[in-house]
Image (cartoon, rainbow, N blue to C red):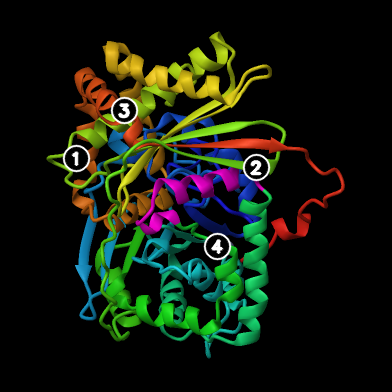
């Protein structure tokens, strides 16, 4: 099974459960090689990075994306001018059934990315049926009266396309990248399964075994996956972000095909979907096609969405997790705001920059101090994702070096933040970080997938695509004083949850997950 965490994803290398992502097996290794590089991982603040692929089993602080591997850009394309601004060549319209469509024209290569974003994910789930959003994602490949089981993916492969499906806390995404002449085919297939998926009990039961295996691989047999699951379940007491995207095992055991079908009926409607098409297309053509294929689908009223906000935390929270593992590991998660108002907000941008100052490049503070100079840690990471439907966390983690303890790592991580709160950051550091933000943006927009992700992620979180470039301006405008101010404001014990892995002996006789399971498609 290939799970690729994307956007802020794997900057932390954490195996949390913000997202479950699938794509065809043959793409995964490519992903790992290209997108999971330092560039994608560490360099770019999340806000801007929104969409980089992390990889298999690496779930991030906030979720992720998996990109079809970015194509090599045409020569000369890696310039800001060629990449353009997000607003350039972008068109939006709404079909009569309420389905929104955003088209981003990019004529550099004869390819197109077609993405259906459902504004529903684990955050909309209720206790007792956690994991249902992700289970539905699996069932979406089980066929319709017109398209037999497995045929959807087979068609795409046959046409030389790549596909990708992903469930995270905030949304469920189905994405295909393919030659532009096949866009009508993609719409036909995707519109068909928005309304006509067949739910058979035996298929459901078979698929549930796959999902349970996926859960074992990613969480139950993964020490860091376990720690991260417990971390989130401790950080949040009321908000549904406390549930793992893949679902609690007991909920999976008790899930019925009717639960999945009900989820499908409630949320998979045109008025809860966003279609993003990016690539070598004309907006007018897309409009005609979208009307033809999606326009005929009937809208339905959506369930009411109740906000479930956290009560203020009072005092530090700690959780310890025992699991067979080689090394200890510690994660600190601070509650921090997300981006709500692109123009008025200041702190989310400053937190993005703070994250990059700490861990945004190879020689950034944490790596330099804790790993290279003090040799306290083998690895340290920072993650913050400002673009969410609900409140966010700022995460710092570390693996102690031989002879050192998680207590020392915790102390050192806190001290690095306190140092910034006390002494601030230099103009030089900010310059460095901002240059990388811009480079990251250019890199992202090299791929049509990246462009689609950028738009979709922002829109799902309630940020209009027209404001995407403003966010970049805002990041560039962050001052040293603002970074210092957020370091002083949010990093105190009443916002803090700490999860610590207590390694247990590894049973040499325990069978490893079969390689076959890793190659499963959905
Ligand atoms: Zn899955």
The residue tagged with tag 2: helix, strand or loop?
strand
Compute the Cα span from label 3 to label 4.
34 Å
Q: Give the total of numbered labels.
A: 4
Of the numbered discs 1 and 4, the one sitting upstream in the chain is 4
The residue tagged with tag 1: helix, strand or loop?
helix
Q: Nearer the viewer, mark 1 or mark 4?
A: 4
Depicted 190 relative to depicted 238: above or below: below
Compute the Cα span from label 3 to label 2.
34 Å
User: Which disc, if any, is residue 322?
Assistant: 2
Compute the Cα span from label 1 to label 3.
15 Å
| Visible residue check, residue 31 | no
Which residue occupies the extreme front position in the image?
315
Q: Kindly identify which residue carries mark 1.
A: 470
| Visible residue check, residue 45 | yes
Q: Nearer the viewer, mark 2 or mark 4?
A: 2
Q: Main secondary structure of the magenta part?
A: helix
Task: Write down which quadrant ligand 1 falls in.
Answer: bottom right
Compute the Cα span from label 1 to label 4.
39 Å
The residue tagged with tag 4: helix, strand or loop?
loop
Describe residue 341's horizontal placement relative to residue 167 as left or right: left
Q: Kindly identify which residue carries mark 3.
A: 353
The stretch drawn in magenta includes residue 233: yes
User: Which disc, if any, is residue 248?
Assistant: 4
Check the picture and name the quadrant holding the N terminus.
bottom right
Compute the Cα span from label 1 to label 2.
45 Å
Q: Nearer the viewer, mark 3 or mark 4?
A: 4
Span of residues in magenta = 222-242
The residue tagged with tag 3: helix, strand or loop?
helix
Residue toward you, 451 or 323: 323
Depicted 455 relative to depicted 313: above or below: below
Describe residue 516's horizontal placement relative to residue 206 as left or right: right
Depicted 225 relative to depicted 178: above or below: above
């Amino acid at each position: 099974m290939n799970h690729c965490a994307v956007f802020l994803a794997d900057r932390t290398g954490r195996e949390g459960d913000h997202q479950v992502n699938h794509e065809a097996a043959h793409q995964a290794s490519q992903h790992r090689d290209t997108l999971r590089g330092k560039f994608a991982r560490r360099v770019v603040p999340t806000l801007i990075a929104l969409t980089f692929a992390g990889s298999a089993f690496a779930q991030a602080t906030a979720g992720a994306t998996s990109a079809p591997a970015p194509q090599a850009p045409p020569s000369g394309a890696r310039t800001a001018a060629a990449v353009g601004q997000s607003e350039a060549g972008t068109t939006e319209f709404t079909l009569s059934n309420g389905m929104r469509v955003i088209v981003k024209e990019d004529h550099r290569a004869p390819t197109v990315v077609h993405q259906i974003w459902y504004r529903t994910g684990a955050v909309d789930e209720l206790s007792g049926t956690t994991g249902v959003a992700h289970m539905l994602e699996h069932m979406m490949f089980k066929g319709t009266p017109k398209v037999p089981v497995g045929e959807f993916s087979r068609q795409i492969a046959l046409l030389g396309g790549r596909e990708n499906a992903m469930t995270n806390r905030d949304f469920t995404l189905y994405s295909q990248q393919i030659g532009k002449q096949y866009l009508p085919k993609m719409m036909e297939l995707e519109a068909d399964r928005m309304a006509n998926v067949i739910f058979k009990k035996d298929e459901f039961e078979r698929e549930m075994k796959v999902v349970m295996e996926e859960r074992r691989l990613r969480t139950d047999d993964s020490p860091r996956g376990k720690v991260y699951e417990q971390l989130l379940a401790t950080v949040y007491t009321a908000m549904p972000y406390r549930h793992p995207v893949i679902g609690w095992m007991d909920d999976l055991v008790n899930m019925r095909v009717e639960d999945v079908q009900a989820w499908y009926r409630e949320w998979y409607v045109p008025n809860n979907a966003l279609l993003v098409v990016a690539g070598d297309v004309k907006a007018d053509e897309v409009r005609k096609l979208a009307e033809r294929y999606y326009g005929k689908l009937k809208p339905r009223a959506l369930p009411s969405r109740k906000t479930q906000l956290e009560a203020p935390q009072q005092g530090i929270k700690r959780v310890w997790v025992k699991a067979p593992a080689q090394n200890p590991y510690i994660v600190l998660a601070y509650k921090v705001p997300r981006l709500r108002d692109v123009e008025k907000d200041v702190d989310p941008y400053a937190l993005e920059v703070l994250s990059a100052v700490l861990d945004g490049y190879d020689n950034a503070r944490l790596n330099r101090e804790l790993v290279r100079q003090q040799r306290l840690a083998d690895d340290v990471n920072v993650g913050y994702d400002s673009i969410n439907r609900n409140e966010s966390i700022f995460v710092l983690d570390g693996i102690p070096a031989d002879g050192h303890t998680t207590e020392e790592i915790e102390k050192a991580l806190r001290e690095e933040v306190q140092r910034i709160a006390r002494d601030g950051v230099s103009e030089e550091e900010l310059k460095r970080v901002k240059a990388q933000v811009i480079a990251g943006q250019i890199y992202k927009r090299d791929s049509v997938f990246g462009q689609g992700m950028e738009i979709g992620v922002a829109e799902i979180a309630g940020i209009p695509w027209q404001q995407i470039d403003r966010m970049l301006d805002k990041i560039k405008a962050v001052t040293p004083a603002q970074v210092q101010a957020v370091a002083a404001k949010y990093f105190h014990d009443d916002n803090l949850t700490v999860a610590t892995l207590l390694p247990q002996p590894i049973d040499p006789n325990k069978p490893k997950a079969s390689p076959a399971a890793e190659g499963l498609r959905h």
